[in-house]
């Protein structure tokens, strides 16, 4: 789950940036005004969340982390009763991009299980933020152990359900402790074994080359499978 550069993000994001470059410029100006006044006063939560989403897309164009900080401020000001799945996953992405791993772990703990799209997602994100903190402190042994256990949990879920969406998360986690070569070889073996999922595994193989990670879950699900 290494940080994605702009060149490795969803191509739909790049198209969005080109079509909305003026809007992004306006968003940047608005960000400046947020530091000098109570910008949140009188704004509806839906409009604020839409604006926060725009700031994130603006980040992918400019790589200006200040946009992420302003987006996070909006998400943090959102009433906890109004946090739905889309907001939760998007906030997770922002916390990941800002490397606010301990805050990310705390946020995941605060969420109910039914907020997540998959039954294993809460534990996956919780463990991922923990592992990232170990990585940041240079403890590769503990982080690798966490990633291996997480991959095993997702594999168990897939074996029981054959939920192909889980494969994206599984191999994103496996990339933390296996080489791309070994992962691609494993996927090739799966293609030979499970003919009924041939198309899904071909798509999965493609996703390994553009470095999918679970923190961009909503983006990748829009064109995967």
Image (tube, rainbow, N blue to C red):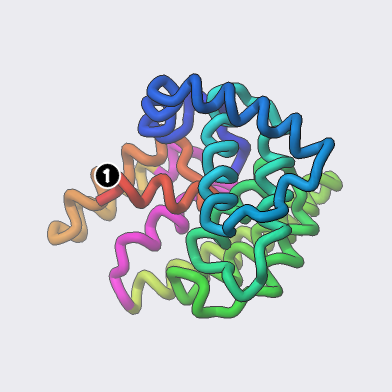
- The boundaries of the magenta stretch are 161-183
Place of residue 196 in the rendered image (x, y in percent of width and height, measured from the top left)? 13, 61
Residue 203 or 115: which is nearer the viewer?
A: 115
* Residue plotted at (46% across, 42% down): 212
* Residue plotted at (81% across, 41% down): 37
* Residue plotted at (35% across, 43% down): 185
Residue 128 or 40: which is nearer the viewer?
A: 40
* Residue plotted at (41% across, 74% down): 157
Residue 77: image quadrant is: bottom right
Sort mark 1 into few (<14), some (14-19) or many (20+) by Cα contacts within 10 Å: some
Place of residue 109 in the rendered image (x, y in percent of width and height, measured from the top left)? 70, 73
Q: Is residue 89 magenta?
A: no
Q: Is residue 166 magenta?
A: yes
Residue 160: image quadrant is: bottom left
| Residue marked by disc 1 | 203
In the rendered structure, the answer to whether residue 52 lies left or right of residue 182 reads right
Q: Is 10 placed above or below 48 here? A: above
Label 1 secondary element = helix
Q: Quadrant of the N terminus?
A: top right
Q: Is 26 placed above or below 207 here? A: above
In the rendered structure, the answer to whether residue 4 lies left or right of residue 19 reads right
Residue 59 seen anywhere in this rendered image of the structure: yes
Place of residue 11 in the rendered image (x, y in percent of width and height, measured from the top left)? 38, 30
Residue 173 or 121: which is nearer the viewer?
A: 121
Residue 21 or 13: which is nearer the viewer?
A: 21
């Amino acid at each position: 789950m290494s940080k994605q550069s702009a060149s490795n993000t969803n191509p739909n994001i790049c198209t969005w940036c080109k079509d909305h470059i003026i809007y992004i410029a306006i968003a940047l100006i608005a960000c400046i005004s947020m530091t000098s006044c109570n910008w949140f006063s009188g704004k509806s939560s839906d409009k604020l969340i839409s604006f926060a989403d725009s700031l994130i897309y603006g980040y992918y164009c400019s790589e200006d982390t200040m946009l992420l900080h302003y987006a996070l401020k909006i998400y943090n000001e959102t009433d906890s009763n109004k946090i739905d799945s889309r907001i939760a996953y998007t906030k997770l992405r922002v916390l990941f991009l800002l490397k606010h791993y301990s805050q990310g772990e705390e946020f995941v703990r605060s969420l109910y299980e039914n907020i997540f799209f998959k039954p294993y997602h809460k534990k996956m994100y919780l463990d991922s933020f923990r592992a990232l903190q170990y990585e940041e402190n240079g403890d590769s042994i503990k982080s690798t152990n966490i990633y291996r256990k997480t991959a095993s949990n997702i594999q168990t879920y897939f074996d029981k359900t054959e939920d192909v969406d889980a494969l994206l998360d599984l191999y994103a986690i496996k990339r933390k402790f296996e080489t791309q070569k070994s992962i691609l070889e494993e996927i090739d073996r799966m293609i030979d074994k499970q003919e009924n999922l041939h198309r899904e595994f071909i798509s999965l193989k493609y996703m390994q080359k553009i470095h999918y990670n679970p923190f961009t879950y909503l983006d990748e699900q829009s064109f995967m499978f």
